[in-house]
Amino acid sequence: MADVGILATTKAAEQIAPRTLDGPSGPRPKRRFSRANIIVYGTLFIVAVYYALPLYVMIVTSLKGMPEIQMGNIFAPPIEVTFEPWVKAWSEACTGINCDGLSRGFWNSVNILIPSLIVSIAVASINGYALSMWKFKGSEVFFSILMIGAFIPYQVMLYPIVIMLREAGLYGSLSGLVLVHVAFGMPINTLLFRNYFAAIPEELFKAARVDGAGFWAIFFRIIMPMSLPIFVVALIIQVTGIWNDFLFGVTYISSPDRYPMTVQLNNIVNSVQGVKEYNVNMAATLLTGLVPLTIYFISGKLFVRGIAAGAVKG
């Protein structure tokens, strides 16, 4: 009788419950593409094509010879691939009085980028750490002043900085340009570090202090190992801003031999002498953007994690 009752209960349950089994394989997942999903994916596809199409044109044009470019079809892939435009853009194109391509500007940009990057991230991270966990008298006022500096247009400060660098004997030098990049990168990076560190559980900080750890011990042994994403965010922001800078480079560097890569790119593209070599211009543009693009591709996931944590918390 017990078996009969169990069998009847099972049959009744099967009649009431909807059938979701598809044979012996188990439940069959239902995939529904709503109208909203179609709109979202369609919009993303259009935006992706919008941004990828110019890059495609630049790449295929840089791999063509001038006779093929003069045929007029910019979207067609190269019939005969050539890397001569890349070689010329790197080592032979004229950038004013020099005809050694972008190679000189590349090393100038590297010499500007590395010290600017190290100093700005080191100082900004310590500022953010102190403002979030070691508050001092007037710390909020200091932070407010620092944030005001982040919204001052660069153009307003151009001439005063020229005077300051001239009085310090640094105008026209790479060291002076490094100081400018450090100063202008400080506010936004301090904000990101402060907000990120403020989201770290305070109990860790208090426990470290109880164990006798001081300012630097907590920073290097506890805070830094937990803060890789925000350091990557600061690195990407600084690399992009410093490497792609044109305004400061053309304003604070007086000698063509010290021009960064972006200034030399402008001199190549806007040259009015001879035939306009579009393939060389495209190759030079791609060469100039390789460094920030490489950084983005390598550390993209950490950038998203860090910017989300550093921008909305604290």
Image (tube, rainbow, N blue to C red):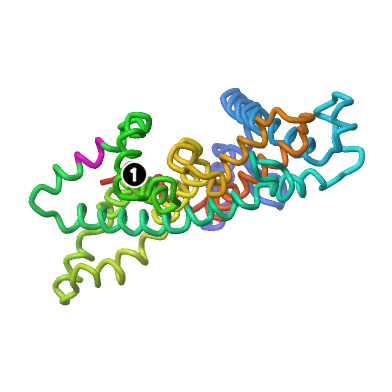
Residue located 40% across and 56% down the image: 231
Above or below residue 177? Residue 61 is above
Q: Is residue 147 magenta?
A: yes
Residue located 24% across and 35% down the image: 148
Q: Badge 1, how many Cα within 10 Å: few under 14, some, many 20+?
A: some
Give residue 93's quadrant in the image: top right
Q: Position of residue 8 (x, y in %)?
A: 56, 47
Q: Nearer the viewer, residue 49 or 171?
A: 171
Q: In the displayed structure, does residue 253 sit left or right of residue 34?
A: left
Q: Position of residue 274 (x, y in %)?
A: 78, 30
Q: Which segment is the magenta one?
A: 144-148
Q: In the displayed structure, does residue 223 sit left or right of residue 256?
A: left
Q: Which residue is mark 1?
A: 166
Q: In the displayed structure, does residue 289 sit left or right of residue 196?
A: right
Q: Nearer the viewer, residue 276 or 143?
A: 276
Q: Nearer the viewer, residue 151 or 17?
A: 151
Q: Position of residue 14 (x, y in %)?
A: 58, 42
| Dominant secondary-structure state across the stretch colored magenta | helix
Q: How many marks?
A: 1
Give residue 35's quadrant in the image: top right
Residue located 76% across and 32% down the image: 278
Question: Circle 1 — which element?
Answer: helix
